[in-house]
Image (spheres, rainbow, N blue to C red):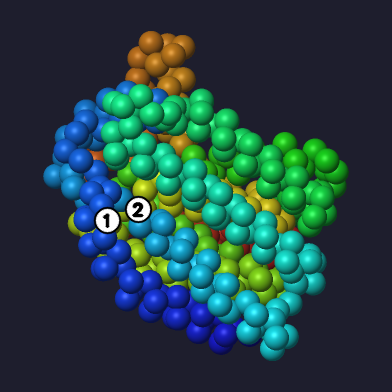
């Protein structure tokens, strides 16, 4: 089956590579791009240091995540009946259709939420009085979606346990629902916060998904393996145009969808704690922002000139490509560590 999965990756890469330039041109025509204006953080406050380093990127199209979502969904829709007819699907642990419904519900629903957020920000609805996604709105909607997904995990896939590295599975029963909800919401926002430099989040995600692709193959889970193969191939084609200087960005449509789906893949494979290791750079990025907020709130001063960590490194003089490349290297090693932990536990 390995040759099939690699072929699907190459197929997805080719399709996305053919479509991405016309898609970029379409985004320009729709004016779906970052305008020359002050950037706001996730609490709707100005970010002058970010603008200092990234003002030249005004006009870059945003919304590459939408193309990836469309390509993966349409290719899977095309391939599913063929692979199913040829009996090339194996899912020893879960009903195939229930697993796919869960994956694509997460992939599409969080993508639609992020797309609305992008439209709100880039078309100036905040100035027209149109309903916009403030932080509390966003978290509320993310939580509703995450609870729905967690209920499907528990009642349809009957996932009621977590694997602890080096210890094995721990049964949680219905308590898995709040835990999985928390992880889904966290990673939807972890990815969003990390998506601040050209190629940073998309490159780290590609590396992490390769690790989970190995775990899915080790578990003989064909539905996830096919999904990850298509997703990785499309991501690599996008990344070619996303590395510095980027011609296109993911936008919230991609960052919310990909972060939440990344967490759900970890939950389905029973490797949610390994997810924290493989996605360790995302965790550190968010931790740096949380430490900054905590210090300002309780001690009245910053611990860093700016957060998250990638922006602080820029502030300290690191060129953007240097920050990204070193983050990728750390991501590779964390993925190797996470794989080792998962495979030791599996044995």
Horizontal side of 107 relative to 243 (left or right) equals: right
User: Mark 2 packing: few (<14 Cα in 10 Å), some, or many (20+)?
Assistant: many
How far apart are the two marked residues, 1 and 2, measured between alpha carbons?
8 Å
Look at 22% across and 55% down and name the residue there. 28
Q: Position of residue 311 (x, y in %)?
A: 29, 38
Find numbered disc 1 in the image and state the secondary structure of the residue it sits on.
Answer: helix
Instruction: In the rendered structure, find residue 27 and report the number of the disc placed on it.
Output: 1
Q: Looking at the rendering, which quadrant does residue 325 occupy? A: bottom left
Instruction: In the rendered structure, find residue 235 and report the number of the disc placed on it.
Output: none
Find numbered disc 2 in the image and state the secondary structure of the residue it sits on.
Answer: loop
Nearer the observer: mark 1 or 2; the answer is 1
Look at 38% across and 79% down and name the residue there. 14
* Relative depth, front residue between 237 and 18: 18
Q: Position of residue 154 (x, y in %)?
A: 79, 49
Residue under circle 2? 63
Q: Quadrant of the C terminus?
A: bottom right
Look at 56% across and 87% down and name the residue there. 3
Q: Are marks 1 and 2 in contact (CB under 8 Å)?
A: yes
Q: Looking at the rendering, which quadrant does residue 76 occupy? A: bottom right
Horizontal side of 92 relative to 234 (left or right) equals: right
């Amino acid at each position: 089956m390995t040759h099939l999965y690699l072929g699907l990756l190459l197929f997805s890469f080719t399709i996305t590579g053919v479509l991405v330039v016309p898609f970029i041109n379409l985004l320009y025509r729709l004016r779906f791009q970052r305008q020359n204006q002050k950037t706001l953080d996730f609490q709707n406050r100005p970010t002058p240091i970010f603008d200092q380093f990234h003002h030249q990127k005004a006009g870059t199209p945003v919304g590459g995540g939408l193309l990836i979502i469309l390509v993966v969904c349409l290719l899977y829709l095309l391939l599913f009946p063929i692979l199913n007819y040829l009996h090339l699907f194996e899912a020893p642990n879960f009903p195939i259709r229930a697993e796919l419904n869960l994956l694509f519900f997460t992939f599409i629903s969080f993508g639609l939420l992020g797309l609305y957020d992008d439209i709100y920000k880039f078309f100036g609805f905040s100035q027209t009085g149109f309903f916009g996604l403030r932080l509390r709105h966003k978290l509320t909607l993310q939580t509703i979606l995450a609870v729905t997904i967690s209920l499907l995990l528990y009642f349809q896939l009957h996932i009621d346990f977590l694997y602890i590295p080096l210890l094995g599975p721990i049964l949680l029963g219905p308590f898995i629902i709040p835990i999985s909800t928390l992880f889904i919401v966290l990673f939807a926002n972890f990815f969003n916060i990390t998506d601040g430099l050209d190629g940073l989040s998309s490159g780290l995600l590609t590396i992490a998904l390769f690790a989970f692709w190995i775990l899915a193959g080790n578990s003989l889970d064909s539905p996830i393996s096919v999904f990850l193969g298509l997703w990785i191939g499309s991501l690599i084609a996008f990344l070619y145009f996303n590395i510095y200087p980027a011609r296109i960005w993911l936008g919230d449509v991609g960052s919310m969808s990909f972060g939440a789906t990344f967490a759900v893949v970890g939950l389905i494979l029973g490797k949610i704690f390994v997810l924290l290791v493989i996605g360790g750079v995302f965790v550190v990025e968010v931790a740096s922002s949380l430490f900054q907020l905590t210090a300002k709130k309780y001690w009245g001063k910053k611990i860093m000139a700016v957060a998250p960590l990638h922006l602080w490194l820029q502030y300290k003089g690191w060129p953007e490509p240097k920050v990204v490349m070193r983050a990728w290297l750390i991501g590779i090693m964390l993925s190797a560590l996470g794989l080792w932990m998962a495979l030791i536990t599996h044995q």
